[in-house]
Amino acid sequence: MTAHPNSAPHDLSTDHADLSVDHVELYVEDLDATARRFAQAYGFTAYARSDQPGDARSVAIGRDRIRLVLTQARAEDHPAADYTRQHGDGVADIALTTVDTAEAFAAAVRRGARPLAAPTEADGVVTAAVAGFGDVRHTFVQRPGGTDPRLLPGFTPVRRAEPATDTGLLDIDHFAVCVEAGRLRSTVEYYEQVLGLRNTFTERIVVGAQAMDSEVVQSPSGGLTLTLIEPDTSREPGQIDHFIKNHGGSGVQHIAFRTEDAVRSVRTMAEQGVEFLSTPPAYYRLLADRLRPARHTARQLADLGILVDEDHEGQLFQIFTRTTHPRRTLFYEVIERIGATTFGSGNIKALYEAVEAERLG
């Protein structure tokens, strides 16, 4: 792993230093079922709706600083219909809060971004959009000072009940993005040039006969982090290859939700029906050879299948949900950081070794 603390040119990064995740729009085939699943299992509540008769309908749902917009097409020519036909349910828009939408849009287009929607104002909110990776776009969102950060043009607030279960999820830590082989470097350069993101980490991960390359780009404010991954097609196909094939190109593989207590969040979510990937017992038997958890006991982690990794800054605890996507693509992560700034690549190797120990033992 290589760190690049100041790789983006200063004049590029400062223009977009304010960028952070405003909300995430997912195009879905069944809005009601998806909203119910997020409400029950993740503790999210609906706070706004938009109904465009004959076109599409949307619901804004979330908790704390997590804001998701779920959109289902009603018309066959709506973008959500095209998206779900090609990809199934998935992330279509990573919207970005900015203090000046017109300036952010103009700067991005000047530097090579493909414009999708020029700046427009509605309900006091200024938005504009540019293309990102694959079929994902970025909508710039500028709100009047002091207004509700959940306010979206065309949406009507709904009576918001407190979630039945407090899962402790706080915000979006990062997005894991799979790109086709050969497109990693150009995608990183695009985000550096167009949005002024900084390349903060580079790593190559080899697991048995498989390999992948990853680079992390982050806004100077830290409010937007993309972990970009491409497969090494000279080696055996792995999960990145399968995602790209099943998704139909580049896209968001998972969204990581941050918590301050992974054990409590994971236990609560599991009780609400969320299924997480299992971890072989050998992982925890070998854990003492790797590190000593700074928080939570090894028994607590083993009981829930939570992974732990560390870097020079501290430790992180993470676990991934089993995908419920028919194409076995999109899933989610729960992550707790105690100083760590990386993304748990040590767990990939440790899990591989644990599986091998189970197989041989």
Image: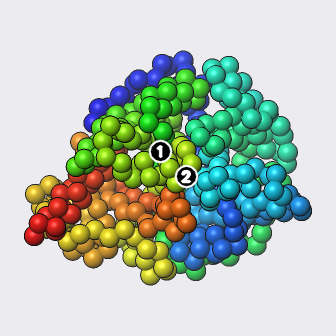
Tell me the element at label 2: helix
Instruction: Say if mark 2 contacts mark 1, CB within 8 Å.
Output: yes
Q: 330 or 11, which is in the foreground?
A: 330
At x 35% / y 60%, what residue is drawn? 318
At x 85% / y 48%, what residue is drawn? 123
Q: Within 10 angstroms of label 2, few (less than 14), some, or many (20 or more) residues?
A: many
Residue 134 can be seen in this image: yes
At x 43% / y 77%, what residue is drawn? 270
Quadrant of the image for the N terminus?
top left
Q: Position of residue 172 (x, y in %)?
A: 51, 53
Q: Position of residue 357 (x, y in %)?
A: 13, 64
Q: Quadrant of residue 85?
A: bottom right
Residue 151 can be seen in this image: no
Color encoding of the figure? rainbow
Q: Report the disc number at residue 178.
A: 1
Above or below residue 253? Residue 332 is below
Q: Report the disc number at residue 247.
A: 2
Q: Quadrant of residue 185?
A: top left
Q: Amino acid at mark 1?
A: Cys
**How far is the residue under mark 2 from the one under mark 1?**
10 Å
